[in-house]
Image (tube, rainbow, N blue to C red):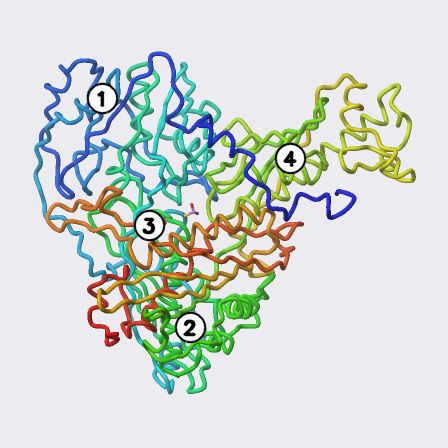
Amino acid sequence: MPESAQMSVIGKAQPRIDGPLKVSGTAMYASDFHFPGMLYAVPVEATIASGRVTKLDTAAAEKMQGVRAIFHRENIGKIFRSVQGQGFEGIIDERRPPFEDDFVRYYGQYIALAVADTFESAKAAADVVRATYAKEKPNVDTDLKADDEPDVVATSYAPTKRLQSERGDAESAFASAPVKLDQTYVTPTETHNPIELQAKTAIWEGANLTIYEESQGVFNLQGVLAQMFGLPKENVRVITKFVGSGFGSKLWPWTHCALAVAAARQLGKPVKLVISRKMMFQSVGHRPRTQQRVRLGATTDGKLVSLQHDYVNHHAILDNYHEDCGEATPFHYSVPNLRVKFGRARRNVGSPTAMRGPGAVPGLYATESAMNELADQLKIDPVRLRVLNEPKIDESLGIPFSSRHFLECLELGAEKFGWSKRKPGVGSMKRDGLIIGWGMAGCAWIAARFPAEASVQLRDDGTVRVASGTQDIGTGTYTIMAQLAAEKTGVPLDKVEVALGDTSLPAGPISGGSMVTGSMVPAVFAAADNAIASLLTIATTTPGSQFEKRKADNLAFEGGRVFVKADGAAKGVPFADLLRRANLRLVTGNGKSEATFGNPKPMFSTHSFGCHFVEVTWQPAIARLGVSRVVTVIDAGRIINPLAGRNQIEGAVVMGIGMALLEHTSYDPQNGAPINSNLADYMMAVNADVPPIEVHFLDFPDKEINELGARGIGEIGLAGIAAAITAAVHHATGVHVRELAVKIEHLLTSSVLS
Ligand code: MOS
């Protein structure tokens, strides 16, 4: 550890170490890699959402200039099915290999692949492939009723009980509760729209496959491809240097990836495949539509006595995706009687997948909206209602929280926002001729560790290299890794090299669940400790070393120097000098940390918490609504880099404004196509929609997660925000919108006319 807290790089607002590469255009994203003889592939999409391909006419396409092949079921070669392994292994949402049969289950499913010398030729060829179909009417019905399924169902990850959590007798407690709320909340299909399109380049050298891909999980992709192409895992190398965001859509492999690999195999050339924005809406996941019934029973003074959360998500014909809307429900508030249960409804859509804050984000929209409506019904301030129902322990598991400071979040948020000035009456607050509405909501997100490995090298030029096969998906992992290595080795950040995104590196975690930082801390620290231990041994055994014949135990390492404990750091020798004297380029330490995620018998309930306070403005004369102010407080343990942390929360709040007011993917009931499948028609929050966002972090280190007490901060900022916005909308307009996104037509019934 450094001599003083001043020297520590932890907790400092460090700009991104990869920033210069990105702004200068030299950062290599998956589609930036070029290879001699490389060919381009463009998939052909089904234009029906249900039925069969009866005939595929590829003759015209095959004759086009520059075309190398049109692949389909007959000539793509063998692609095996993959199977789930242990933990996060072998995960893929759409398990069916591409082209496995003639059936079409969703609009945009790939039915052929054109490969040509240029992207333009491949696209032109794909466009002239003609398919004849036996069409069936697709089911993209938006009203979701749970299909008939057993009590335990398969999901993308593991068999899961549909009755997720139960205590007491929620039904009878609800029946006898003096105050009741029973409402259904709907969230629409939302599509991930990272700016970087999904891209991959596949290269075979004999029985070895290398793939450049924008993956949020290179090791899972390696395992899945090894299975699909019948290879030993070590024959597959996945490289992901930079990712232009993913939001979950790049967590697990998609079918076009296998197509690129199969085409490269058949043609013996590197093949690049970059999908279109339209395809991004069809075949690489989305947040599924959810329909959630929430029933709350309370006493007249605001104590919850019963909570029931019954929800349904749509999923595809080809997958088992479960949107875990009940993730936060069982522990968020104190309530003696609770029941959380889910069902699913199959539709002719591409497979859903995790999207930023999967489950908890739509889930907390519903449960926090219900809490806000209950507060109105009880005429209790919504902050007060939450304080009244603060749990002492995680009542679902009967264990303590490792670190829960939700009440402090509420207190700080209310103070910074000026909540005490809120007048409860609908339409009662005005500023500059506009009606203003204030709303708030709480949020939570899981905090845990995945297994992680890292290596740290001390080198003879005084630099350090830290490596792990995790990824930086734009969230700041390169910078955090450099900070962790700098903290332990005392080397300044600009002398730390970080290597990520490669299956040839020590196994790193998926960039998912906001768990990378928390997972990497102990692995990098252990690796650095081991590198330092080797260095001390070298110091005591190298002939001519100042520390020759001393005991390693009597030496210490601090600020990049080795010294005799009794003499103090000032008399230390830089590690580079010791390495040079020993004629060593470097010493390496490896570190590993175990998972806490999925622990069947945890001692503590570990989560991050937070809250949002939101102001909207409402102009009834022109039915204009906007978010004008947001204060967000996050309790995520120790913040390693407040700059990157604030970026994450601000980004999530921007996405939350989009979720509440704009985002929704609509399927055409005739052909099942997502019809707003482009960035013009799919509305997202942009600069003009976003007011100043005030982000505050509490600073309560959570030592259950790692020695720094740092939990993750990516996803929590999106949880709860939509409920805070719809509460503010109600406060301004008197309209309860229970189906996102809030549209002008919802507000035309507003009783607030001026
Ligand atoms: Mo996040 S949905 O775990 O990428």
On the image, the x and y values in percent for residue 416 come to: 52, 66
Of residues 651 and 471, the one nearer the viewer is 651
Disc 4 packing (10 Å; few <14; some 14–19; many ≥20): many
**Mark 2 Cα-neighbour bin, 10 Å: few <14, some 14–19, many ≥20:** many
Q: Give amino acid for label 1.
A: Glu
Q: Secondary structure at mark 3?
A: loop
Q: CA distance from mark 1 to mark 4?
A: 43 Å
Q: CA distance from mark 1 to mark 3?
A: 35 Å
Return the x and y of residue 484 as percentages of the image width and height.
Answer: 64, 40
Residue drawn at (24%, 20%) of the image:
115
Indicate which disc, 1 or 3, sits on the residue closer to the N terminus: 1
Q: Earlier in the sequence, mark 2 or mark 1?
A: 1
- The residue wearing badge 1 is 120
Which residue, given by chain and number where applicable, does mark 3 sit on?
321
Report the amino acid beneath label 2: Leu
Badge 4 amino acid = Leu
* Image side of residue 374 versus residue 65, left or right: right
Asked if labels 3 and 1 touch by Cβ distance under 8 angstroms, the answer is no
Asked if the residue under mark 2 is in contact with the one under mark 4, i.e. CB atoms within 8 Å, the reply is no
Tell me which numbered mark, 3 or 2, is placed earlier along the sequence: 3
Quarter of the picture containing the C terminus is: bottom left
Q: Secondary structure at mark 2?
A: strand
Residue tagged 4: 493
**Tag 4's secondary structure?**
helix
Q: Mark 1: is the Cβ under 8 angstroms from ligand 1?
A: no
Real-space Cα distance between discs 2 and 1? 57 Å
Image quarter hosting the N terminus: top right
